[in-house]
Image (cartoon, rainbow, N blue to C red):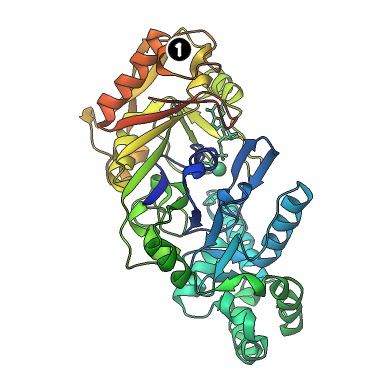
Amino acid sequence: MLTSICGINWGDEGKGRMVDLLSEKFDIVCRYQGGNNAGHTVINDKGRFILNLLPSGILREDVVNVMGPGMVIDIKHLCGEIEKLREGGIKISPKNLKISDKAIITMPYNVLQDVMEEDRLTKATGKPYGSTRRGIAPVYADKYMKKAFRMGELLNLALLYKRLPDIVEWKNLTIKAYGFEPVTVEAMKEYFETYGKPLADYVCDVGIYLNEANKAGKNIMFEAQLGALRDIDFGIVPYTSSSSTIAAYAPIGAGVPNLKLNNSIGIMKAYSSCVGAGPFTCEYFGDKAEKLRELGGEYGAATGRPRRVGPFDVVASRYGIRCQGADEIALTKLDVLSGYEEIEICTHYTLDGKVIDEFPFTDVLDECKPVFEKVKGWNCDISKCRKAGDLPKAALDYIKLLEKLCGCKIKYVSVGAERDAYIEM
Ligand code: GDP
Ligand code: MG
């Protein structure tokens, strides 16, 4: 069984918590794209954990975790993340963590590039991309320029060091043009020595491992970072991530392009949130936004930034479901809407006075206006509900309405951040 778990919206839908929950039925969890710009918060019996690079299955002892070739890995950050989890009592060894030899290494100068460019953009245009400043776009650019380093190179540093001086020289052309201090070959060698060497034992051809596991009938889950609207091809350009967050990419990014997904579970939030810049048509402002942000605790897991919020967006979510090819939905954070007598839904957009049902070419999003409709709220605590029958009628009606408007079955509903706070419909 090969299942992908992907975000339907702008990210932060609660993918981490759903992977943590659903991974019970899986033997292997793979991350297949992105880097430490991800922030998954998982709360379970062992405590509260924030995962940036490690797959969320790392918190279950019998799950093997794979970091695929589609990822970009900041090795310093990964060493720190492993250390922190170990302090929290999580066991991590090459037995339960396998890193693709083809995954790309995020370099310190990529982080510098990200900062330099966001600052330049801010000064030049007042409109930065809202990057997490963790070097993700520059390192993916290096990958496509064929000037990046791969995790497999950690196994033969002498060979890597032959390539290093020319790449440093090439990178310094850019850094100097921004007016910053060039980086040195020595500093980069130190980066590999300090943070690369301890990871070498985890590096392997994960494709061999995953194919054998699949043949043996193991259940494999592919965990996405971010949502459909942040996908490099299908998202809101340029406010996207720099990788493919789409389910169809999962087998490639995980190292098994020969395998086909059996199903795709889309994680969709009961309302909307968005980190960073760019158009966000259904956005609330002022007191309305403040209330929803507080109720939902909408502050970034990776950065602490307050997230922009709004009601559920049917137009964007339907597009997200299509991009992800979602077979079923896990609807998260329904409990957050418990404090409302009436709940708004963004059912349509209008553009130049015309009603829009389909998510448009993203350049016109700035001109789109949201159309809000109101439905009855339940206005009572639902966080203790564990089966559909426990839910008040208005909450069930809300779920059914989203199902109908989005055209996809809602299989799970979460009503709290804890592992067991969910309902299987
Ligand atoms: P991810 O990036 O998609 O994994 O999501 P994040 O972890 O960034 O954001 C989701 C946040 O909502 C986290 O703080 C979770 O602990 C929290 N959360 C997840 N599911 C629920 C839920 O059903 N109810 C509530 N109240 N919080 C939830
Ligand atoms: Mg997140």
Please name the residue shown 50% across and 16% down the image.
385
Is residue 118 among the parts visible in the rendering? yes
Furthest-right residue in view? 87
Residue found 62% across the figure and 86% down from its top: 160
Q: Dot 1 lies on which element?
A: helix
Name the residue type under label 1: Asp
Position of residue 169 in the picture relative to residue 8 (left or right): right
Determine whether, in the image, residue 260 is placed left or right of residue 310. left
Q: Position of residue 260 (x, y in %)?
A: 30, 59
Counting from the top left corner in percent of width and height, residue 424 is at 41, 27
Q: Is residue 249 above or below residue 394?
A: below
Q: Which residue is mark 1?
A: 390
| Of residues 420 and 69, the one drawn nearer to the viewer in this rendering | 420
Give the image location of residue 359, x and y in percent: 28, 39
Picture quarter containing residue 307?
top right
Q: Position of residue 101 (x, y in %)?
A: 54, 75
